[in-house]
Amino acid sequence: MAPQKLLCLPSLLLLLLTRLLPQAHTRSFVVDRDHDRFLLDGAPFRYVSGSLHYFRVPRVLWADRLFKMRMSGLNAIQFYVPWNYHEPEPGVYNFNASRDLFAFLKEATLANLLVILRPGPYICAEWEMGGLPAWLLRKPKIHLRTSDPDFLAAVDSWFKVLLPKIHPWLYHNGGNIISIQVENEYGSYGACDMSYMRHLAGLFRALLGDKILLFTTDGPEGLKCGSLQGLYTTIDFGPADNMTKIFALLRKYEPRGPLVNSEYYTGWLDYWGQNHSTRSVPAVTKGLENMLKLGASVNMYMFHGGTNFGYWNGADEKGRFLPITTSYDYDAPISEAGDPTPKLFAIRNVISKFQEVPLGPLPPPSPKMMLGPLSLHLDGNLLAFLDFLCPQGPIHSILPMTFEAVNQDHGYMLYRTYLTHTVSEPTQFWVPNNGVHDRAYVMVDGVFQGVLERNMKHNLFLTGKKGAKLDVLLENMGRLSFGSNSSDFKGLLEPPILGQTVLTQWLMFPLKVDNLVKWWFPNPLLKSSHPQTPSGPTFYSTTFPILDSGGDTFLFLPGWTKGQVWINGFNLGRYWTKRGPQQTLYVPRPLLFPRGALNKITLLELENVPLQPQIQFLDRPILNSTMHKTYIYSLSAESASEPMELSGH
């Protein structure tokens, strides 16, 4: 029998190895509460991460930004998934091109970066409506971020599409996602609906399984309503905050496990009309080093900010409505144009004291280009293109309707009525109850009269004959992304009043400006007759070649007032030269056609054009010039002097 036992030995060894190998290769990311640390594949692990938003960076530049983050010493990245970016209409999903977040996950894998995912449903991020789709507001009585059945039904439908797509990318499934955040700073919202949070946690578990680490993030004041049993509690704070005090508070909610700052602020956001925000290098690096000495895991928000292209910026409510600038540079370690800054090298030096940093230099700044000045020619006023901007024709209503009521999520809508009697003396035109959301450009018989703005005092007086055409162009400047429990409807929320007369019988034109710029403007036959002294909403454009290899550049609009810019049909974003602080718009090199082809730039100037309608392309940004003392007037003196509260993300 002995020979038979010897023959069985190889089989036994094979069986033993077969049982051991899966254990050796099991991938895991877990909390080790006994030793206050994370374990990655069973070994002690601490992440030093940075935030980057794929939706704020052109897809062709993802790999460049991720490589620079890895070379800075980071071993992970953190990013949001904006629901409204992927489900533009109920049941219509877009994960293509710049919205292909799975291609972004793949690029992160190639850069050897783990991922901390924040899929919402609400994300803040200074993004339009905090990432929630505007079409939710088509049900006007909906209660966002609560257990309102209408809201939960939409959330469930979205996550049943998104989360199964995420499942293969979880770390234990062979992907790079080590943890996932449930909601976002919910404790700052004020609803404190724990049934809603429990519903979300159950939904995530049902669709993602039990192995993935789920967590919450809140500021110190939000831990009570933002944390939930069964979800790992993390906190956020910046360099100026008392780290010892805040981490001690965190321990009341998460007594054991690693300390985690999910948003350590390397910079800050900018509002139109406020000064450009900065955070000093010594303050940022000192706070980072102190946290790393404690063994904490840290995510730096932002590590690379990027740009709010198109209409994607959000807004805050801090005594008045404060829309976010187009630039999301954030004074981050990697600039809006993707260049390393002194802050990056200082942070890299700190990280190198605690963990290995990849060998080799960081890439140098990208080439930059100067061009101009270029003169723009007048295409015509906006009213002249109304048939092309709204080919389906207007909607009629006795009282004005909101953007949401007519399915206009972004951009602009024109409201039109006719005077029922002659107004010979200058008579005040106003909208009660702060009913302009957000900015109105008023015209009588095509002549620009002035502006009404949300939360602002504007004395606008009109005259006109009976039957005169009154046009009010409404601009949505970005829905609230933080700081309000109320839904942020856009347009005329109340009927305007002229003197004592409530104006009725409105025609509403939802405008498809991007379609006009992209498809109609190349046709020279559509050019309208030009007004002698153009003012009010007016289109300008020109073409220009790139004479050499070119590079990234920054569009400067000296003397222009406020409007929107397109380059080669791509919506570059909003400018507001007269208010600041941002004076230039970042133009990534891939948006420009190569040598030999003509590039086209189109401006929709909403108010006043300079005497010489020119633009320039500069080789550096101007983000810190503001004139808000001249241009901002609050509804009350008190709100002007209130200290600014910090926003969440």
Image: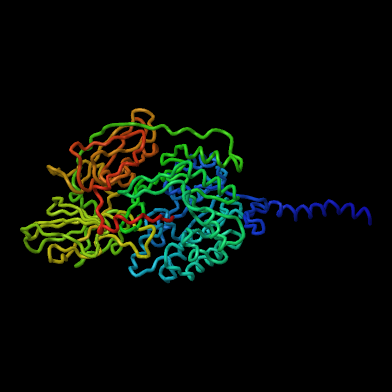
Q: Quadrant of the C terminus?
A: bottom left
In percent of width and height, residue 426 lies at 9, 57
Is residue 26 at all visible to an observer of this figure?
yes
Quadrant of residue 473 in the image? bottom left
Is 154 on the left or on the right of 78, as rendered? Answer: left
Q: Is residue 434 above or below residue 348?
A: below
Q: Is residue 646 above or below residue 566?
A: below
Residue plotted at (54% across, 39% down): 348
Q: Is residue 286 above or below residue 386?
A: above
In percent of width and height, residue 64 lies at 48, 39
Residue plotted at (88% across, 52% down): 7
Residue plotted at (44% across, 57% down): 123
For this rendering, which residue is in front, 560 or 459? 459
Residue plotted at (13% across, 44% down): 531
**Colour option used:** rainbow
Is 180 on the left or on the right of 304, as rendered? Answer: right
In percent of width and height, residue 346 lies at 51, 38
Is 592 on the left or on the right of 156, as rendered? Answer: left
Determine the residue located farthest toward the top in the rendered image. Answer: 548
In percent of width and height, residue 212 lies at 59, 59
For this rendering, which residue is in front, 515 or 253? 253
Is 540 on the left or on the right of 209, as rendered? Answer: left
Q: Is residue 173 above or below residue 351?
A: below
Q: Quadrant of the N terminus?
A: bottom right
Is residue 93 at all visible to an observer of this figure?
no
For this rendering, which residue is in front, 8 or 134? 134
Count all numbered tags in the image, as a single digit: 0
